[in-house]
Image (cartoon, helix red, strand yellow):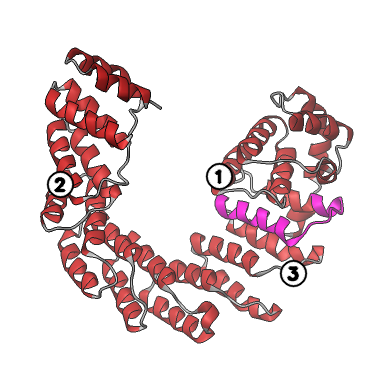
Amino acid sequence: MDSALSSPSLNADSQSKTSKISTLHFATTSLGEKLDAHLQNSPNNVEKTLNSLAPIKLDTKYVNDIIHRWSLNNLQLGLRFFIWAGDQPNYKHNLYIYNKACSLFKIKQNPQVILDLIATYKVEKYVVCVDTFKVVLRLCKVGGLADEALMVLKKMPEFNIRPDTTAYNLVIRSLCEKGDMDMAKQLMGEMGLIDLYPDMITYVSMIKGFGIVEKAFELLAEMEKEGEGCRPNVITYTSVIQSFCEQGRAKDALSVLELMEVRGCAPNRVTASAWINGVCMNGQLQDVYKFIERIVGGGSVSMGDCYSSLVVCLIKIKKVEEAEKTFRMALSSGMKPDSLACSMMIREICSEKRVLDGFCLYEEVEKTGCLSSIDIDIYSILLAGLCQKSHSAEAARLARSMVEKRIPLRTPYVEKIVEHLKNFGGKELVAELVSMVR
């Protein structure tokens, strides 16, 4: 590990390639021009040069542009910029940009670049902080570099930096995802030696990593003993239930739900949706309806919420006929499906070229008052379909409704809809619709 981290190859490569920066074309932005000019003159301490340009207004688009360009010409310099940017007070990397960096820098194929980065910081005596290391550790986690994350964590004291709980959690989660539960457990134990305490994220990561219901119960019991700050809540239980469901282990998930209820923690809509989704994805539909009766009986989740989740799941697994049957049954029973279920159901029916059925269902949904937050694209899809099939009366009725509700046509559908409505004498209606086009 030490030999891997002691190599100054990152710094040497950075110096040798800095001259190439002038060939980069950072559009016409002032920040790109400043970086280009300054880094040519100060190739050794990249971060110091970047700090001298502060304040720099960063956003995901700009960071993406810079790391993309430097990944083609100077990978190490791009990586140093990425770590520096993630440590700035007014900007934080999101998951998208972490994934992008992993891809551009090819860290999965070349994990040594991470270790060389830490070695370069040491050689240059760059003043890093715990947040700097956490950006590196997040990059390792997203890139699936559990071993390298562990090595980086172990190097933090050499910079006189004490890892915090978040740093430990990032490495523990990486190890759990890798399946190295022995090392994850060892790290969890080490936290207490430096007066740190596992939090909810630590425990949930360990529970998911072990993937054993008995171990889950054991760790959940430990969390209860830790007291208020770490006591399992609905988010904790739901996360564990979702993890078991994703593995096709509905019975284990149900056991966790039972424990949840015994501990006085009421499941919510997300809990129900996680279980329903997991069961549907694994083809265990016969268990769903009993589950819905049970969870609704507890009073914390409505029947409408459960059936909305079921409809969405059935559509996702291409059981459209059963989804439609379930949706219509829910409507006839007085339930109010949510906007996602309504939008997906109507969209799916239209995609099957059954636009008139889709419109009739739309009108049924409208009577229940569920259309207030429906996807506005659905209106244009329906109207375009009705026009194409020459259902003029229904098209005119829907168009008037859109005008009354001030729902604009979507641009891709305008031409066909306008042409049809004009042919049937709806010039005033067309004018009003066109005036609202986005």
**In the rendered image, which residue does mark 3 sit on?**
162
Secondary structure under tag 1 reads: helix
Height in image: 214 above or below 141? below
Q: Nearer the viewer, mark 3 or mark 2?
A: 2
Residue occupying image coordinates x 68% and y 80%: 193
The answer to which quarter of the image holds residue 10 is top right
Residue occupying image coordinates x 30% and y 37%: 405
**In the rendered image, which residue does mark 1 sit on?**
99
Q: Give the CA separation, mark 3 to mark 1.
A: 27 Å
Q: Position of residue 340 (x, y in %)?
A: 30, 48
Q: Amino acid at mark 3?
A: Arg
Q: Residues within 10 Å of mark 2 (few under 14, many from 20)?
A: some
Height in image: 266 above or below 226? above
Horizontal side of residue 438 vs 366, given as left or right: right
Q: Quadrant of the C terminus?
A: top left
* N-term mark: 1 or 2: 1
Height in image: 435 above or below 225? above
